Amino acid sequence: MFRVPISRRSLLQSAAMGAAGLLSSRLFAQVPVDYAAASQAAQGSKWAVATAHPLATQAAARQFRNGGNAIDAAVAASLMLSVVDAHNSGIGGGGLALMRLADGRLLAIDGRETAPMRSLAEHYLDENGKPVVSRSQIGALAVGVPGLLSLLQELSQEFGRLSWQDALLQAALVAEQGYAISDYFAKVLQRTAFEMSRFPASAAIWLDPSGKPRQAGDMVRQTDMAQSLRNIAQEGTHWFYQGEFAEKMERYMIEQGGWLRADDLANYKTIRREPIVGTYRGHQICGFPPPSSGGIHIGQMLGMLEPFDVAELFQQSTATGLHLLVEVMKRAMADRVHWLGDDDFAKVPRGLVDLGYLSQRSADIDLTRSVRVTGHGIPPRADIDLFGRGGHTTHLTTADADGNVVALTPPVNTSFGSKMVLPGPGITLKKQKGDFRLAPGVRNAFGLLGSQANQILAGKRPLSSMSPTLVLNSDGTLRLTVGAAGGPRIITTVLQAIVRMLDLGMAPVDALGAPRVHHQWSPDLVMVEDRMPGSIVEQLQQFGHTVNITDTLAVAQAIEFKNGQFSSASDPRVPSSAAAL
């Protein structure tokens, strides 16, 4: 893989700073976003990208055309999403990156947020010792130490070909000159406007002068964030983690009653973890380990499906196929509630993905009726063979002909995270504490329960449903990559995408567009998208499932590589886009 030497990169930096404005202007300045014209499927042999926003896809494509690789493209897309997809993503939060490099290495880099070192579980209890859930979801107590920027810098400097300064300046230009928001974005603003009105810096961007949420087609400009991105391009991440941003963050957190301090930012470090690798239908399934729950539970569900002829079941009856998927979802998600947490703090058994254990968990699946799952299983060697011992959300994916593949999930949790924009820097702050368990029996924003394994502790990373996933052929080359946004529905969405592509032979765009189901064990009901045919819903009810109809369960992106061609696809449920060459 060609890389620019460090010395040459230093020489290129000043040129990049000067040229980026002109080059970026040709792509972005004063150009309304035509969401309707954005392609959600593309094919090519050199590179491919799929993201949640057309401008992010354009930013990635530009890096490819400038000689960059899949890592450069992913970094550029993520930085652009921080501007144009701020309700889902941003450098005020964290992220996970799962990669296959051109030399065949697999890497999992954890840029998840951490709880500030002064965090205590008691901060989320009232004077009577009862949980105050809103404290973990809105405002200063919801904010964690952001890791995405550190992650992106590491990706760029160690694995990219290009300096990331140009990507930062592209994003800065769009933030300054503005972009038109989509219908989907406007609906998100409608739902969150009241909460954001509590914070003047948030209201100044996302509400109009009368205090109403901005409408579809309105131009949104973020001049403070533009300057922050330029500061990072000029000074590096030092500005963010040790400099002006850290100082302003500490002052604002003290003012707002939060516990994050400048030393929390200064001490932040990404962590390299060992990917979880299993098999399904002769393919290698590579997932992210704890504190992500996705790698374990996608591996569990596929392991439980392996003995079944899934293609035959779907051919006989779509409802029967979906019923089987729901049954494996229930069993995996019951295990999630009890066993999963940050494996640097909690005992997370490797036996959760043991094939014998999965056979035991799935032994009572009945293809004719719903079976009540009473709780979690007990995997083998649960106390001694552990992960980590011994060594709203968005998703984007990129791939190139050299064999580099990136699956990157950089969320801010629920829409607009903590609902706070840091005054001055103009950066939306992620809601991180809501992913912890506050107390026994208390559900988080996604209705999930948890155990002591996911209790708030200083320095701990909260459990996540982020599921960046790679599917490799038996020789280690790419077959497909997929990931999603949507809380716990990420896990079940990725499962359905893999099954539809590998078992049912569907093209990525069709696999992502198909109606979905979701079950997270508790509450005991199946969420079904309203695009599902009514006859199938009725059949699911006849199996004994309680059904709840909803609009959109998650938003996914995927790239498949087959017969020398990339096929990239972005979810049709939102104005996302895909590109390839």
Image: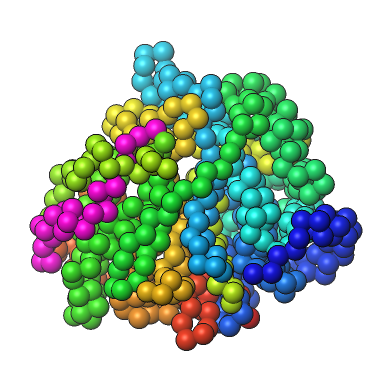
- What residue sits 37% from the left and 48% below the top? 293
Residue 366 on the magenta span: yes
Q: Check the picture and name the quadrant holding the N terminus.
A: bottom right
- Write down the quadrant of residue 453 in the picture: top left
417 relative to 286, above or below: above
**Front position in the image: 102 or 518:** 102
- What residue sits 56% from the left and 79% below the top? 42
* Residues shaded magenta: 345-369
306 relative to 142, above or below: below
**Front position in the image: 471 or 92:** 471
Residue 531 at what x, y percent from top left? Answer: 37, 69
- What residue sits 44% from the left and 65% below the top? 470
Point out the residue furthest to the top here: 127
- The answer to whether 218 appears left or right of 554 in the picture is right
Q: How has the structure been colored for display?
A: rainbow
Residue 360 at what x, y percent from top left? Answer: 13, 55
Residue 354 on the magenta span: yes
Label count reads 0
- What residue sits 28% from the left and 32% below the top? 441
Q: Check the picture and name the quadrant holding the C terminus.
A: bottom right
Q: Is residue 478 visible?
A: yes
Q: Is residue 201 visible?
A: no
Residue 9 at what x, y percent from top left? Answer: 80, 58
**Front position in the image: 134 or 24:** 24
356 relative to 388, above or below: below
- Write down the quadrant of residue 434 in the picture: top left
